[in-house]
Image (spheres, rainbow, N blue to C red):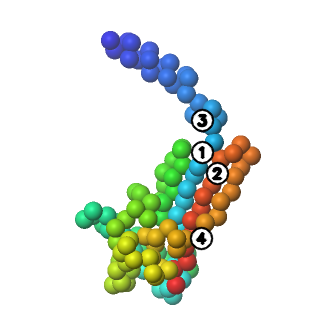
Amino acid sequence: MRKLVLFLYIICLASCDKNCDDCGAYVSTSYSIVNRLGTDVNLVFFNQGQNTEVFAENDKEIVLHQLSVVSQEGLLEIEPVMYDSLLINDIKYLKSDCSSIENMLCIENYTLSETKDDIGNTFKDYSLEVK
């Protein structure tokens, strides 16, 4: 049985294209912010009772989350728009209230830049300046 599993594993490795040349076109999505508040801030993202702290330096861009078919990167485990609430300097933002343009939980507050490469891959970059 062990030899069979090893054989199947080797066959799978040999047949898989690690560069994803045969995967077809894919979409890469990233969310980034630029802190323009005039000071460094701690952002605290809340999701189902758990929180994630992100330190944002003044006048610096940070990638909150980036996801593609080949990788996941960034300071948050999931997209910022998937969190329930956000705390910035004692100001709490809720996902249900998108009236403030600083609310990073609302997709409509981001500026979308979308590009495609030669083979049809799409790169969606959502960016937000927090002032």
Given contact means CB atoms under 8 Å apart, are the residues at marks 3 and 1 in contact?
yes
Contact check, label 1 and label 2, Cβ < 8 Å: yes
Q: Amino acid at mark 4?
A: Thr
Structural distance between the alpha carbons of marks 1 and 2: 6 Å
Residue 110 can be seen in this image: yes
Residue behind mark 3: 23
Location of residue 56 with respect to 22 vertically, above or below: below
- Measured as percent of width and height from the top left, residue 122 is found at 64, 51
The kind of residue on which mark 1 rests is: Tyr
Callout 4 crowding tier (Cα within 10 Å): few <14, some 14–19, many ≥20: some
Residue ranking furthest to the left: 49
In the image, residue 18 sits, relative to residue 98, either above or below, namely above
> Which residue occupies 59% across, 62% down?
125
Q: According to the image, label 2 marks what residue?
A: 122
Q: Are marks 3 and 4 in contact (CB under 8 Å)?
A: no
Distance from disc 2 to disc 3, alpha carbons, whole Å, reads 14 Å
Identity of the residue drawn at 69% across and 45% down? 120
Query: What kind of element bears circle 4?
Result: strand
Q: Amino acid at mark 2?
A: Thr
Q: Residues within 10 Å of mark 3 (few under 14, many from 20)?
A: few
**Residue that label 1 marks:** 26
Q: Which mark is residue 111?
A: 4
